[in-house]
Amino acid sequence: MYRVSIMRMTVLDENAEEFEKACAEQVSRVRENEPGTALYAFCKRGPDGSTILGKPKNGRSEYIHIQAYVSEEADKHHTDLEQEWWGPTFRRLLDGLWESERYYTPDITTGITRDWTWDANQYRFAFHRFYIKEGMDEEFEGHASHQIGVVTKGEPGTVLYTMCKRPADGSTFLPQPTRGHAEYLHMMAYKDEESQAHHRVLEHRDDGKWCWGPVFRTYLEAPLVNESFMGAQVLCGLSRDSQWGAVWGDVDIAPLA
């Protein structure tokens, strides 16, 4: 994967309906014209904010926009097409500048997307901010790639599951990590409630086999913070089959004993 971006976009409430229609039109254009775009989706934030981001200002609607491109050529192709319609359109509707954070190879640590249409029928999308103990980032990344192997092999209903290493200087989207401590942005999405329940079973299995839940917690410097989008908050988008970064090749996902 060449580039991943996450953006926080603010729109006056009076322009929200027009903005959301434009988002749907843009996703349709991406689907038709951008085979190298592996992820492109819009979700509407709730009024109360979350543990990772503050709540929207009164009279404003806020959106999270995520995107990923499989190559530099795919990224450039999207940028060229964006200038024709989407770029001028969303800039006209935004209330001020957007906030964003970008990740490039090799900081796109590990992950997977599956072919899926994102809409209100989807169960959930969420992102987490992982604070990692000093000097343990390389070891943590090895376990994360193992987890992506488990998701790839055993979770067909998990349509997005990724881990990206945050830039040391932070961004307009999130402040910089604590000096000496690596941080990761983890994103996930599930087709339906059953898919998420299956993921949790594998993440917390208690039959002695490796599982992500207890492992990743040993590396955390601070509690997880996150934001979650359910049902109708997932406005529109798409993902395509793609491997992100390193994935553990041989994993054991035998049925629970």
Image (tube, rainbow, N blue to C red):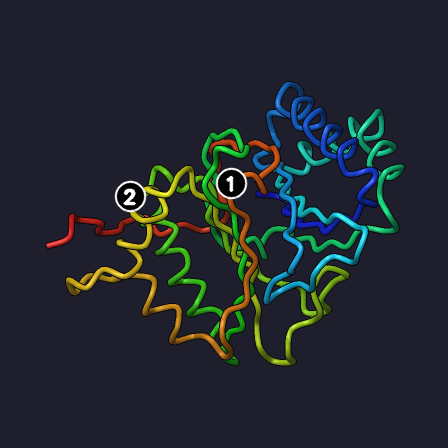
The residue singled out by tag 2 in the image is 154
The crowd level at tag 1 (other Cα within 10 Å; few <14, some 14-19, many 20+) is some
- The answer to whether 70 is drawn above or below residue 176 in the figure is above
- Disc 2 is placed on an element classified as helix
Residue visible at 66% across and 32% down? 74
For marks 2 and 1, give the CA distance.
24 Å
**x, y percentage for residue 146?**
35, 56
Q: Amino acid at mark 2?
A: Gly
Which residue is more in the foreground, 196 or 188? Answer: 196
The residue singled out by tag 1 in the image is 231
- Disc 1 is placed on an element classified as helix
Which residue is more in the foreground, 158 or 57? Answer: 57
**x, y percentage for residue 159?**
44, 39
Mark drawn on residue 93? none
Q: Amino acid at mark 1?
A: Gly
Image position of 166 (left or right of 171): left
Query: Which quarter of the figure is the C terminus placed in?
Result: bottom left
Give the label, 2 or 1, closer to the camera. Answer: 1
Residue 212 found in image quarter? bottom left
Mark earlier in primary sequence (2, 1)? 2
